[in-house]
Image (cartoon, grey):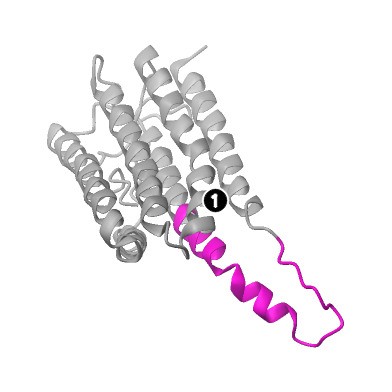
Amino acid sequence: MSQRNELQRIEAFSDAVFAIACTLLVIEIAVPHVEDVLRPGALWPALKAVWPSFVAYLISFASLLIAWANHHRGFRVLVRSSGALLYANGFLLLTVTFMPFPTAVLAEYINTPQANIAAVFYSAACLTMNLSFNLWWLSIRRPVRLLAPSVSKAAERKLTIHTLSGFTFYLCTTALSYWFPATALIVIFGVQVLWIVTSVEEGDVAVESKYSEQVEASAPVKAPGPWLSTIEV
């Protein structure tokens, strides 16, 4: 099997796992129950009562969306696979599939006196997912460099700084969550929106490898902004 086919298999499997994780998020939102279905407007209060589930779903979906975008763009600059990448990718997917659980916990307790614990648990899950992404990026650089030769050392260093900044960010929000859970969640979601906006504004940089089966030679790869920061995960 060629290196390109092996990378495509890993990415296809990963895409399926991301899709399942996103689907599980919405499954956690229970349909509200209405006692008197004959009373006009009775459903509105019931829908309002599940607002914590909508908030938790929105934040988590944004996290998984950015994680998937980072993962997808990362694979576009690879020219080969390795055992380290295979298992690091597996660990990343493990943390991705775990996210529906802390999301459900957050939705259940964010509007209760247990909100700080729920927020800390959720932020810690995001921190763990970001840690797994850092390990994934490390496996691309060590022990064998899997990046296309056209990816410069400067671009590699810049992306490494972005991934580490994501870990620092979630470490801070995890600590903040204990005393100010609502504030921490707002900060997380705000940074996620900011990341998406800046990513779209920068545009999608073509990063086809020179080993691509569809082209004979590729253009030089530029550092495509903060797409590996997961300040999002």
Q: Quadrant of residue 68?
A: top left
**Image point (35%, 37%), residue name:** 128
Is residue 173 highlighted in magenta?
A: no
Q: Can residue 74 be seen in this view?
A: yes
Residue type marked 1: Ala
Q: Is residue 229 left or right of residue 2?
A: left
Residue 104, x across and y down, in percent: 54, 50
Q: In the rendered view, would you say 96 is above or below 33? A: above
Rendered position, 210 above or below 23: above
Q: How many labels does the image show?
A: 1
Left or right position of 228 against 29: left
Residue at (42%, 19%) from the top-left corner?
86
In front of the other: 48 or 170: 48
- Tell whether position 35 is magenta: yes
Callout 1: few (<14), some (14-19), or many (20+) C-alpha neighbours within 10 Å?
A: many
Residue sitting at 30 percent across and 51 percent down?
A: 231
Q: Residue beneath label 1, please?
A: 104
Residue at horizontal 62 percent and vertical 52 percent from the top: 28
Determine whether 71 is above or below 115 in the image: above
Give the quarter of the image for residue 189.
Answer: bottom left
Range of the magenta residues? 31-60
Res 233 visible: no
Quick check: 30 above or below 18? below
In the rendered image, residue 2, in percent from the top left (x then y), is placed at: 48, 14
Q: Nearer the viewer, residue 194 or 122?
A: 122
On the rendered structure, is 26 left or right of 57? Answer: right
